[in-house]
Amino acid sequence: MNQEKIQKAAAFLGESTAKRQRRNLPDDLKPANEAEAVAICEAGWALTGGDPAGWKIGAADPKARAAMGLTVPFLGRIEKAGIRHGDQTFPFADMRRPIVESEYGYRMGRDLPPRAEPYTRAEVEDAVEALLIGIEVPESRLEDDHGLAGLGSACDNGASSLYVEGKSFSDWRGIDLLGHDVVMTINGEERGRGTGAAVMGHPMDALVWFVNHMSANGRTLKAGQFVTTGSCTGVIPVKPGETCVADFGPLGKISVAFPA
């Protein structure tokens, strides 16, 4: 795929975002591999311009990544307009195939600019301002029959849309993210359970990977931005009339309702 087609694909997806549409890429604009999918995604970032409020890591779980036919996690920008705080309600009719993911995130206290040598875990930890709990609510701009498997998410800005932030913790270093379960319930029924170990072994390990991936690609993770590190409880589709609660144990709960 040449650069002209990459730009056309990015513009097509950008138009879908602006019009709140779901539609498939034309055949000649579909990525054939991960490199093309990433190129379309990053061209979309350039068209959006400015700095996002945050970033997401998708398919952080190696099993999920393998099931999607991907070799590396995919990424997405989360814009300021998509950030919510506390329990939320989103009318289902306004959504584009929503799913829910219970995730740990980190807000940065200082910039981590590109450099030649990788950042160490200690350096990344020193740049973190707070630990977050939240529910990411991805939405797809592609129809269900897009036929791209994981390349669809990789080119579609990781299906990034909404991030519902729960509590934040500035004194986060002593918090054990592996020692208690995170549980996702929908209308009171358990639909997912896991720990921070589902996210590259530990959410901080995912953040370190992300920082160095950004650095290697000439990008700065900036102070004030956050990174949501991937779902502890899997990718769970929702239906009209459902209420989803992510229970992070001692760290609290956060809920999202989708009334019909």
Image: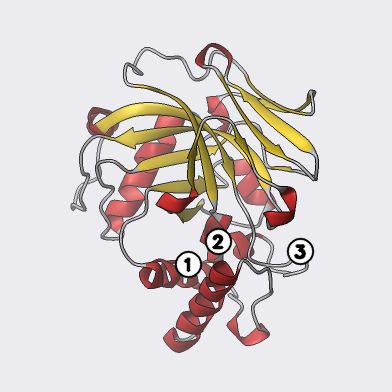
Q: Is residue 248 above or below residue 157?
A: above
User: Which residue was labeled with disc 1?
Assistant: 41
User: Which residue is at 29% across, 56% downward?
Assistant: 216
At horizontal 70% and vertical 32% (from top left) the residue drawn is 244
Residue type at tag 2:
Ala
According to the picture, the residue beneath numbered tag 3 turns out to be: 144
Say which of 251 and 59 sits in front: 251
Q: Which label number is shown at residue 154? A: 2
What element does badge 3 sit on? loop
- Residue 59 pos. (x, y %): 57, 47
Q: Earlier in the sequence, mark 1 or mark 2?
A: 1
Classify residue 62 by image quadrant: top right
Task: Give the Cα distance between marks 3 and 2.
Answer: 15 Å
Distance of label 1 from label 2 (alpha carbons): 7 Å
Q: Is residue 80 left or right of residue 65?
A: left
Identified at 48% across, 72% down, the residue is 40
Q: Amino acid at mark 1?
A: Cys
Residue 167 point in image, percent of width and height: 46, 24
Pick whichever of labels 3 and 2 is earlier in the sequence.
3
Q: Are marks 1 and 2 in contact (CB under 8 Å)?
A: yes
Secondary element at image label 2: helix
Dot 3 and dot 2 residues touching (CB under 8 Å): no
**Crowdedness of circle 3 by 10 Å Cα count: few (<14), some, many (20+)?**
few
